[in-house]
């Protein structure tokens, strides 16, 4: 069993990784982290491309947490949502953690298409977290 | 701290209560269960009205789980989503659990407006579960 989390370098993306660490400790399980896509089949891949510094910071956070984890990149992935759902199946996940944005001051709905696709297609429960 | 879950007598509603029990055990916390609305300010309240038998079954499930819990009804509530978000604030929740439908065979998007509103307005993480 494992917890799957995709990393994007946004406040909610960082909150998702921290939440995944907390949940992994609580459930005595490991983390599968999917890093941002770097080209390949992603039309809008560059939107999700975290900097080398951000990836290094997250890897250090995971390393220092004491939780067992493995990092993966879907260089030629389909879409972030499909990659996460696939990873959940491949890695026998018990939980997926995703970051979602807070409602803006204008009340505009902000749940992105990736979050919606993950919620619809996830084979396991999805924990949705916001930035603190 | 507590876990807030709203009960609707659907496969995903029952899955949400079971998941809330599992999470409460894992986190050594209590459950706040909101029962379906019985009139009051809800235009579509009858959609969510669980039968007396269903409520009794859920109360028995909770009772037998050994988890501490309290039951609440928002007879004159605003909307199911607002009631759940309010309860999460009032009861100092650490987590909200909601049931969401599986994607249908036609691929139609099925995340309801209540689920979306809860995700947008929740002050704490939301665990989204489907029926097994």
Image: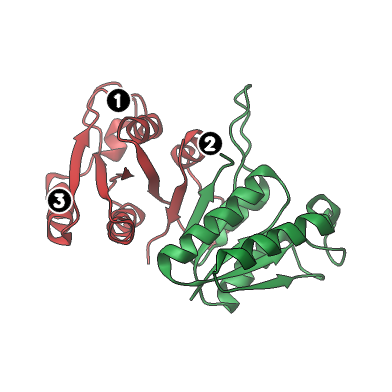
Chain colours: A green, B red
Location of the N terminus of chain B (image quadrant): top left
Q: Nearer the viewer, mark 1 or mark 2?
A: 2
What's the chain of the residue with tag 3? B
Q: Position of B112 compared to A83: left or right?
A: left
Disc 1 and disc 2 in contact, CB within 8 angstroms: no
In the picture of the structure, the residue carrying the numbered disc 1 is: B77
- The residue lying at 52 percent from left, 77 percent from top is A92
User: Residue A70: percent from the left, percent from the top?
Assistant: 64, 74
Distance, label 3 to label 2, CA atoms, is 29 Å
Q: Which mark is residue B62?
A: none
Is residue A62 among what the camera can see? yes
In the picture of the structure, the residue carrying the numbered disc 3 is: B59
Location of the C terminus of chain B (image quadrant): bottom left
SS category of the residue bearing label 2: helix
Considering depth in this image, is A44 or A64 the residue closer to the camera? A64
- The residue lying at 27 percent from left, 34 percent from top is B46
What's the chain of the residue with tag 1? B
User: Residue B85: percent from the left, percent from the top?
Assistant: 40, 33
The quarter of the displayed image where residue A119 is located? bottom right
- The residue lying at 56 percent from left, 50 percent from top is B109
User: Residue A101: percent from the left, percent from the top?
Assistant: 62, 39
């Amino acid at each position: 069993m494992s917890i799957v989390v995709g990393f994007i370098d946004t406040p909610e993306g960082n909150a998702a990784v921290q939440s995944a660490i907390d949940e992994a400790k609580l459930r005595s399980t490991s983390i599968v982290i999917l890093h941002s896509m770097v080209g390949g089949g992603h039309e809008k891949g560059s939107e999700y491309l975290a900097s080398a510094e951000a990836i290094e910071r997250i890897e250090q956070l995971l390393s220092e947490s004491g939780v067992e984890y493995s990092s993966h990149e879907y260089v030629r992935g389909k879409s972030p949502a499909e990659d996460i759902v696939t990873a959940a199946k491949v890695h026998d996940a018990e939980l997926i953690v995703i970051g979602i944005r807070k409602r803006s001051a204008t009340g505009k709905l902000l749940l992105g298409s990736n979050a919606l696709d993950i919620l619809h297609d996830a084979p396991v429960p999805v924990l949705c977290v916001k930035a603190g």
